[in-house]
Image: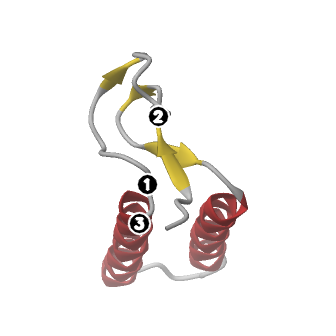
Amino acid sequence: MTYWFKPKRYGLGATPANRKGWLVVIGFMLIVAAFIAVLMTRDNLSVELVLAWAAALVAVEMLFIWIAWKKTDGAWRWRWGSDDIGK
């Protein structure tokens, strides 16, 4: 299995390890930018509309985190820069 992400050396989470990982990150950033751009072009923002957009954005973020978690080579845990990455 080819992993798209590798555990970060410091902190919690993962960083892109190859082209597929970077494409997922860039795609996520474009989706977030599109959410913001569409929301900012609206003339009349109601609380319900903002909450609906926020819920959709949280769903996209959770999907991104799940993909990164499943495609990471190793466990997500807090790291302090130890040399155990890549072994």
Marks 2 and 1, how far apart at CA: 10 Å
Q: Which residue is mark 2?
A: 8
Bin the neighbour count of mark 1 within 10 Å (Cα to Cα): few under 14, some 14-19, many 20 and up: many
The structure residue drawn at horizontal position 52% and vertical position 52%, both measured from the top left corner, is: 5
Residue 35 in percent (x, y) is at: 57, 75
* Amino acid at pointer 2: Lys
What is the quadrant of the C terminus in the image?
top left
Mark 1 vs mark 3: in front = 1
Marks 2 and 3, how far apart at CA: 19 Å
* Amino acid at pointer 1: Thr
Q: Which residue is mark 1?
A: 72
Residue 43 in percent (x, y) is at: 60, 81
Dot 2 or dot 1, earlier in sequence = 2
Label 3: element kind: helix
Marks 1 and 3, how far apart at CA: 16 Å
The structure residue drawn at horizontal position 66% and vertical position 72%, both measured from the top left corner, is: 37
Q: Which residue is mark 3?
A: 61
* Amino acid at pointer 3: Glu
